[in-house]
Image (cartoon, grey):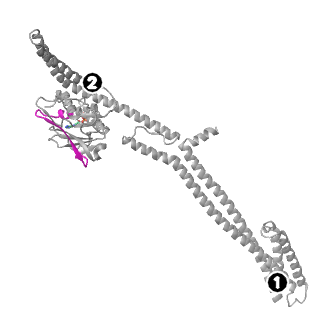
Amino acid sequence: MPAIRGAFLRHSLRGKITLGYYAVAAIILVASLFFVGELRTLEARVVLGQRATDLFNTVLEIRRFERNYFLHHQAADLEENAAYIKLAKTMLTDNRADFLAIATPARLGELHTLLSDYQQQMSAFAAVEPPPLEREPRVRTLGQELVAIAEDMAGSERRQIQTTLASFRTLLLGVILSMALLIVVIGRALSLRVVRPLKEMETSVAAISANRRETLSAPSDDREILSIITAFNHMLKELDLRQKSLMRSERLASLGTMLSGVAHELNNPLSNISTSCQILLEEVGECDAATQKMYLAQIDQQTERARNIVRSLLDFSRERAFRKESVLLRALVAQTVGFVRGEVSAKSVVRLAIPEDLRVLADAQRLQQVFVNLIRNAMEGLGPQGRIDISAQIVHASEPPAGTALGEGCEMKGEMVEILVADSGPGIAPDILPRIFDPFFTTKDVGHGMGLGLFVVYEIVDEHGGCIAVQSTPGQGATFCIRLPHEERGAGTAAGASGDKGAQ
Ligand code: ADP
């Protein structure tokens, strides 16, 4: 049981805070008990001091009535003198135990004997008739000794009170200082064991939200922190799975869009192959070997083209880990346009203004997804004479692109590849412009849009360390601007799609 309690205190935030609380409470309790004890001692000393002063005052009264008696010879003065002597003796006897703290037993005995001697001397005068005119030197000496001893006792008690007060002050100061020190030490220990792990967690959470790390690591072995971290990491994993599943459904939607374009794309090589085969069949045995070879080469070429289209579609549909490579941008965009062209009205125009050799360092599959989503959105609002312009160039960025801009790369300066996708559609109303990248935001009817297209675009651009911005004037179309870190021309392995067959 004690072992369990020890572990609870060591591995639990609540345990540590409770321990700190009990430690402070114990310190305050001990200090309070100590001071109560000290105050009681001081109180006893003050009472004793009062008694010593009373004894001294009584002795002074004895002497006053002694002097009066010898001056005026009044019997009343003698009586008062006797009464005070009696009182002093009673005081001495009753408070003997207390007076032992300020005088030795011998000194107390001496005082008692002096009082008795003095009493005897004074009683002797009561019987003398006529009363003596002069004070008896013996009485005077005894009286002086009585006063001296009583004064000494009162003075000694005063000195003791002063010493006690001085040591009480020093102790109070010492205890206050050590309490402050202990509280600082406890506070520091709590801050080390409680606040620091929380601060580290705050930094880690910020790093996760900035995509710089994926999971939270435990900054301490406290139970509460461990369970928060486990729950948080579990939540991150769940979010990741859900995001992947959203991406998957978005990709399926894109695949649906692409299928009619792919069918159209496949149609060309297939009809070329078919034509070449028909010619060969018709001319079997009639044409020379060179012509046969030419038609067979065409069939081979068109088969390869069809295979490339199918491979690209398979590549796009396959789920795979994020992998950057050097991508020929124009080829990729042209192929994507070809795939989604089935959706464009026959009279609409898609124009490309991208240098042939412009490369970006990107995940080709994901970048293609970006273009599918942007082109699909642009096409959806296009009128019969609609136009989509896709251009790209290397820019020297010194500030974020104009309009609503999102992404890690928006603050990046220096050379970047800037891709513009502009359409002549209806544009986007200013009030919805800041929300179009939000997940599940759509203005389309139920069943026509999930509101994930631009969210996925933003996620992919951000994953590439890029930036996406949008500018639009209602009635005059919308322009999406993507900036990606620039890949040096010719560097890396050429990848991505080849050919430029989709653009008009
Ligand atoms: P969805 O297409 O499923 O609605 P998106 O995230 O792709 O989801 O787009 C969100 C909203 O942004 C759309 O519903 C539309 O209102 C607006 N939008 C996006 N692109 C354009 C565009 N090129 N022209 C006009 N509106 C657009």
Magenta residue check for 395: yes
Q: Where does the image place residue 393, in percent across and percent down from the top left?
A: 20, 41
Between the C-alphas of marks 1 and 2, the distance is 130 Å
Q: Residue 243 falls in which quadrant of the image?
A: top left
Task: Check disc 2 and report its element: helix, strand or loop.
Answer: helix
Is 74 or 332 nearer to us in this picture? Answer: 332
**Mark 1 or mark 2, whichever is nearer to me:** 2
Q: Which residue is mark 2?
A: 314
Give the magenta part as a residue range: 375-403
In the image, the residue with mark 1 has its CB under 8 Å from the nearest atom of ligand 1: no
Furthest residue toward bottom: 133
Q: Residue 37 falls in which quadrant of the image?
A: bottom right
* Above or below, 171 relative to 221: below
Which mark, by number, is residue 66? Answer: 1
Q: Amino acid at mark 2?
A: Leu
Instruction: Return the disc, 1 or 2, that comes first in the chain's sequence.
Output: 1
Q: Where does the image place residue 368, in percent across and percent down from the top left?
A: 25, 32
Q: Where does the image place residue 237, in percent across and percent down from the top left?
A: 40, 33
Question: Relative to residue 129, is residue 402 drawn left or right?
Answer: left
Q: Residue at x 80, y 65 (%)?
A: 97
Is 83 or 169 nearer to us in this picture? Answer: 169
Ligand 1: image quarter: top left
Decide if residue 161 is in sight here: yes
User: Which corner quadrant holds the C terminus?
Assistant: top left
Which mark, by number, is residue 157? Answer: none
Task: Check disc 1 and report its element: helix, strand or loop.
Answer: helix
